[in-house]
Image: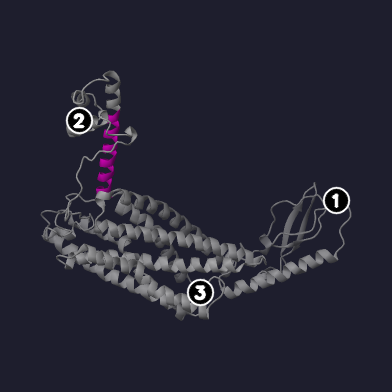
Amino acid sequence: AILCLVSSGKSLKLLQEQWRTYTNECIQSFISTPPAAGPVCNRTFDQYVCWPDGSPGTTVNVSCPWYLPWYRKVHQGLVYRVCGADSRWAHGKNTSECEQDDPGQQYGQILSKFRVMYTVGYSLSLAALTLALAILITLRKLHCMRNNIHMNLFGSFILRAVSILVKDALLDQMSSAHFQGEFIYAGNVSGCRVAMVMMQYSVMANNYWLLVEGLYLHSLLVITVFSERNYFYIYLCIGWGAPLIFVLPWMTVKYLYENEECWERNINMGYWWIIRSPILFAYLINFIIFIRIIKILMSKLKAHQMRYTDYKFRLAKSTLTLIPLLGIHAILFTFVIDESVPKESLLRLIRLFYDLLFSSFQGLLVAILYCFVNKEVQNEMLKKWKRWKLGKDIEEEYRHTHSQTPHAKSGSMVPALTHECPETPELAAMASAESQHLVTGLQNGVSQNRGRVRLQLTSEPQEGASNCSSLTEDICLEERPVNSECSAVVTETNV
């Protein structure tokens, strides 16, 4: 708990050294003091304070440990612990007199609460994004340029969440071992540094995939015809390749000049700009694209007021939907940097809370807006469910009919199938031709595994088919060439 109250690296190192000195003094006092006669609660060190032998049935008190950073303010305080009648120490202790309500301690407690908040956010985002990515991968009919970019964005969010959670766990493990004076293996330090490098890479890759989303939307506006395949390769290089250009030099500088502990502290803030500057650049570019898109949306919607009477509502909805997709929230505190804000100031806490809150829950919002409530995805999931249900119904009908008329001809059961499936009346017309073909195949032994019947009731999308998203619906109001991504517009808002 004390580690959470110490913010700077220097203070933490000093605290660790003083704690080890206090521990050695405690052990020496145990060795030099003869044991008490009779039943007692044995002398012990509980990693916080040194307890002498205690008489059963009493409350033992000792002075606050002198290694506490705020010891001068609590030097007259005491720590209390109960020695039970069975000569065993009680589990808890009363340290209220050794707790100082100073700004540094309050700041550490606030940071601890912030960590709980963003851990919950990243955990929820990780679960939602994993499910959303699995859905988009499974629905092959939705594999278009837009959703391919979405899938890579989801992957970058997942990598970011995993790397941050792993980094926190390793830092906790190392800090605890270091604080308690345990030996830290070189492999543990290397593993922690690898986790830190992966975190920096994943954060930058995530921001650059947000930039790719903005560039893709911008290309729909300004480029009439473009090769999706060539552009997608460029987007892959920007999203996954560009971060390496900055992370590798940062890793080299840290190894040569700041090769301390887990590389979690920025001693020379100039080195930190190797990571910070490209992220700020991505923020600014996306913000410019965001403003441009909003202006175009406004002009298009005003020009089509007869078609969209609720254009103000649609504009507001499109704006709010774009904010998490492009990471526009990050622009608010872009120029509030650590060097310009006093440590432990209110503005710094507000900026930290804002960044951690939106960064951790951003993945959850993106998964909800662009997968779970997207009607393209919902409709495709419904189709898959109906196909699976129809296949089960046809197989069940085949088993039922085959058991009653084992020597019936292959075509004799089709009329009965269409009339004896009341649970799927909406699929009766579509099922008649498909079911006859399937049942004939089943009776002739074509299907070897009846439990894995698969129906292809709809054709695959053809080359050049439109897959306009709800997000670009308003952007695609003006006519575009037939082979363009925006050649047709969905008639219903998906988000």
Front residue of 66/326: it is: 326
Q: Residue at x 31, y 68 (%)?
A: 237
Q: Specify which label sits upstream in the sequence, 2 or 1.
A: 1
| Range drawn in magenta | 374-395
Judged from this view, the residue extending furthest toward the top is 404
Quadrant housing the N terminus = bottom right
Which quadrant of the figure has residue 352? Answer: bottom left
Q: Is residue 476 above or below residue 85?
A: below
Which quadrant of the figure has residue 80? Answer: bottom right
Residue type at mark 1: give it. Answer: Pro
Residue of label 3: 343
**Percent x, y for residue 161?**
43, 59
Q: Nearer the viewer, mark 2 or mark 3?
A: 2
Q: Nearer the viewer, mark 2 or mark 1?
A: 2
Front residue of 260/228: it is: 228
Res. 200 in view: yes
Residue of label 1: 39
**Percent x, y for residue 222?**
17, 68
Residue type at mark 3: give it. Answer: Lys
For this view, does 299 lie left or right of residue 398? left
Q: Residue at x 35, y 58 (%)?
A: 154
Label 3: how many residues lie within 10 Å, few (<14), some (14-19) or many (20+)? few
Question: Secondary structure beneath disc 2?
Answer: helix
Front residue of 229/321: it is: 229
Q: Nearer the viewer, mark 3 or mark 1?
A: 1
Residue of label 2: 436
Q: Main secondary structure of the magenta part?
A: helix
Residue 162, disc? none
Label 2: how many residues lie within 10 Å, few (<14), some (14-19) or many (20+)? many
Front residue of 364/394: it is: 394
Q: CA distance from mark 3 to mark 1?
A: 52 Å
Question: Secondary structure beneath disc 3?
Answer: loop
